[in-house]
Image (spheres, coloured by chain):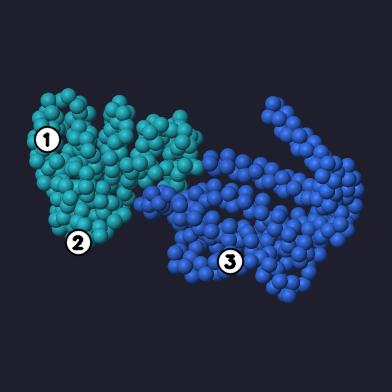
Chain colours: A cyan, B blue
Amino acid sequence: MGNLIKITNLAKSFNDKKVLDNINLSIDKSERVALIGPSGAGKTTLLRIISGLETPSQGTIQIHNHNTGYVFQEPRLIPWRNVEQNLLFVKPDADLEDILVKIRLKDYKNHYPHQLSGGMKQRVNLARALVTNPDLLIMDEPFSSLDLPIKLEIINDVLIQWQERKFTMIIVTHDLKEALLLADRVIILSSSPGQVVEDFTVDLKDLNRKISDPALLNIESDILHVLSNVY
Amino acid sequence: MIKLRRTLLGIILFLVIWQVLAIYLDANTIIPGLGAIYNELTSLIGKQTFLVAVVSTIGKVIVALLLTLLIGLPLGFLLGINNKLFDMFRPIIMVIQAVPVISWLTLVIFAWGIGFRGPIFITFLSLFPIALLTTVSGVRNLDKNLLEMATLYQVPRWLVIKYIYLGSLLPFIVAILDVTLGQAWKVILVSEYLCGNSGLGVLILAARYEVNPAKVWALTFFAVLLGLIAERLVKLLLRKVAKRWAI
C-alpha cells in the first residue's frame, strides 16, 4: 500500500506560539489512524493542515487524494436547509438514497437541524462527509457530546462504511476506547507544542471490536502507560 | 377573544379621554372634538383630491423603499464582505447620516423645486444608511464555520451566496423592512409637507393654512391607518418567506 499522506518536519505557529513541532508522519491508503493527546497538543490544527484549511509554518505535507470528507466537532449544518438539502449542498448531483439508509437518516431527510437530536445531527455531519465519496475521512472529536449507546451505534456505522469504501480515516479523540474501537493505529501527541510521542499499532483483526475484549484491554493498558507521562 | 375585548376597551377609553379633554380644555386648536374629526374623515373619503393624495403618498413610499432596498442591500452585502471597500465608503455613509435633513431639503428645493422627486430623495437618504449598515452587520455576523465547511467541500460560490449568505441575511432583511417601512411613512409625510406638490403631507399643510385641526387629525388618522395596513401586509409576506426558509 502506498502513502496517502506524507508529513515531513512540519511545524505550525500562531502569533509566535508554536502549537505543532517536528511532525513526521506517513499514513497509508485505507489506514485508520487515531490522534490522541492533551488539550493544546495541536490535534485539530494538524487535521486542519491535512484538510487544507490551514497551511504549515514549516515543513511539507504531501497528500495524494482528491476528496476529503470532514466530520466537524460541531455539526455545522445550514439551519434553514433540511437534511436532504444539507447533503445536496456539498454534492448537488448526489444520489442520497443509499447513504440515507446506511446512516439511518431516511426517515429524517425532510427534518431541519433544529428538529434533530445531537446524535442525529452528527449522523448528518457524517453523511455529508461520505456523500462526497471521500478517499480521506477526517473526524475531529465527532462523538464528544454523544451518549455511549449513540456513540457506539455511529462508530459501527463508520466501520461498515470503511469496510465498503476503504477510505483512509483520521480521527482526533480524547477517548482512548473510542480510538481503539475505530483505529488500527493510535498516535500520541505531547502537549504544546504537539510532537509525536508514540505510534501504536492496534493489532486486532476483528473489525467488530468489543470494549471488554481482553486483547483490546491489553493495548489500552500499554497506551495508558505512555499517556500518563504525557498528561 | 379576551385580548380583542381588551384592545377595544382600550380604544374606547382613549376616545372617552380625548372627548373629555376636548370639552373641558376647550383647546380646539389642538384637541378638536371627535364629532368634528369624524365629519372631516367622512368628507375626505369622497373627495378626488384626497384619493389622488393617498395614491401619490403610497407611490412615493413604494419607490423610496424599493430604491433603498435595491441599492442598500447589494451595496451593504459588498461592503460586508470587503473591508477595504467598507473603509472607502464609510466617510460617504457618515456624511449621509450626519447632514441634517433640513440641509438636504434646501438643496433638493434648489435642485428640483417643489415636486415628487424631493420627498422620494429625502426618504431614500434617511432610510439608505439603515438598510446599508444593517446588511453590513448581517454579513459580518454570519457563521464563519458554515463558510469554512463550504470551502472545505469546494462548494461553488453562487451556492454559498444563495444558501449561506442569503439565509443568514434573511432575519436582517426582515428587520430592515420592518424599520424602514415604519420610518418611510413618517419621512414621506414630512418631506411632502416641506417640498412636495401632492400627497397626504401636502393636504396636512393645506389644513394648517386653513387652521383646521380636525382635518389635520383626520389626515393623520388615514396616514396611520395606511402605515398599519402596509406593516400587516409586509408581515404576512415575511411570514411566508420565513416558513419557506425555516427561520
Q: Reading the chain from its start, which is encountered first: label 2 or label 1?
A: 2
Chain letter, disc 3 residue: B
Residue B53, image quadrant? bottom right
Front of the two marks 1 and 3: 3
Q: Amino acid at mark 3?
A: Ala
Q: Quickly name the residue at label 2.
A: A58
Q: Position of residue A23 (x, y in %)?
A: 15, 53
- Along the viewing direction, whichever of A131 and A50 lies nearer the viewer: A50
Q: Seen in the image, is B71 located left or right of residue A213?
A: right
Separation of residues labelled 1 and 3 (CA atoms): 66 Å
Depicted B34 relative to depicted B49: above or below: above
Q: Amino acid at mark 1?
A: Leu
Q: Amino acid at mark 2?
A: Gln
Give residue A224's mark.
Answer: 1
Q: Position of residue A195 (x, y in %)?
A: 14, 50
Tag 2–tag 1 contact (CB < 8 Å): no
Q: Do the residues at pointers 2 and 1 share their chain?
A: yes
Q: Residue at x 45, y 37 (%)?
A: A113
Label 3 secondary element = helix
Q: Quickly name the residue at label 3.
A: B98
- Along the viewing direction, whichever of B225 and A153 lies nearer the viewer: B225
Chain letter, disc 1 residue: A
Tag 3–tag 2 contact (CB < 8 Å): no
